[in-house]
Image (cartoon, rainbow, N blue to C red):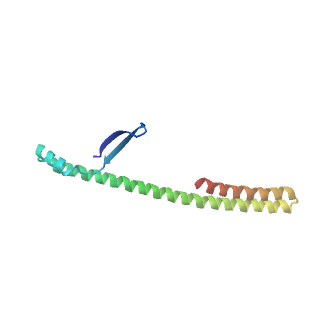
Amino acid sequence: MAKKAEQTQIRQNEDGKVSAIRNTIIDDNYLPSADELQKYQNISKDIIPWIMDRVEKEQNARLKFNDDNMNLAKKDLKFRQLYDIIALILAFVLVIIALAATIWLLIEGYNIAGTFLAGGTIAVVVYALLDKRKTEN
């Protein structure tokens, strides 16, 4: 039952410049004003209970909408936290596997390949974690 009123004023400054000011007023009250209710009562005796019922339904709908939005935000936060935990665990597992492969390569005598694998793995994991934090902020 939102009511909207708009006013436009055109003014001329001392310099001769013309400016327009537009005001928009939105009245988002659930109930009409007392004067309007009295006018409605004169039209029909059953209209006030009907209006009260509609106002109650509107209020309940808005409260439900807000509750649904809060629940959605909570689910999103839990998902993001779970995603971060899984990403950290997978990064840790990847580093362990890469380090094990590096140790095996170094033992087998592939020193250059082992060094590149260890350095590349650490660089990629650090870059991925830092890039993720940068894009979140």
User: Is residue 125 toward the left or the right of residue 77 in the image?
Assistant: right
Image location of residue 120, percent across then percent down: 77, 55
User: Is residue 66 toward the left or the right of residue 135 in the image?
Assistant: left
Q: Residue 7 lies in what quarter of the image?
A: top left
Above or below residue 45? Residue 108 is below
Q: Nearer the viewer, residue 22 or 72?
A: 22
Q: Residue 21 lies in what quarter of the image?
A: top left
Q: Residue 43 lies in what quarter of the image?
A: top left
Count all numbered tags in the image, as a single digit.
Answer: 0
User: Is residue 117 toward the left or the right of residue 135 in the image?
Assistant: right
Q: Farthest residue in the front direction?
A: 14
Question: Residue at the location (17% across, 49% down)?
Answer: 35
Residue 110 visible, this angle = no
Residue 31 visible, this angle = yes
User: Is residue 86 toward the left or the right of residue 116 in the image?
Assistant: left
Question: Residue at the location (61% across, 53% down)?
Answer: 135
Image location of residue 46, percent across then percent down: 13, 47
Q: Nearer the viewer, residue 97 or 41?
A: 41
Image location of residue 129, percent across then percent down: 66, 58
Image location of residue 33, percent across then percent down: 21, 50
Name the quarter where the C terminus is drawn. Answer: bottom right
Question: Residue at the location (80% across, 60% down)?
Answer: 102
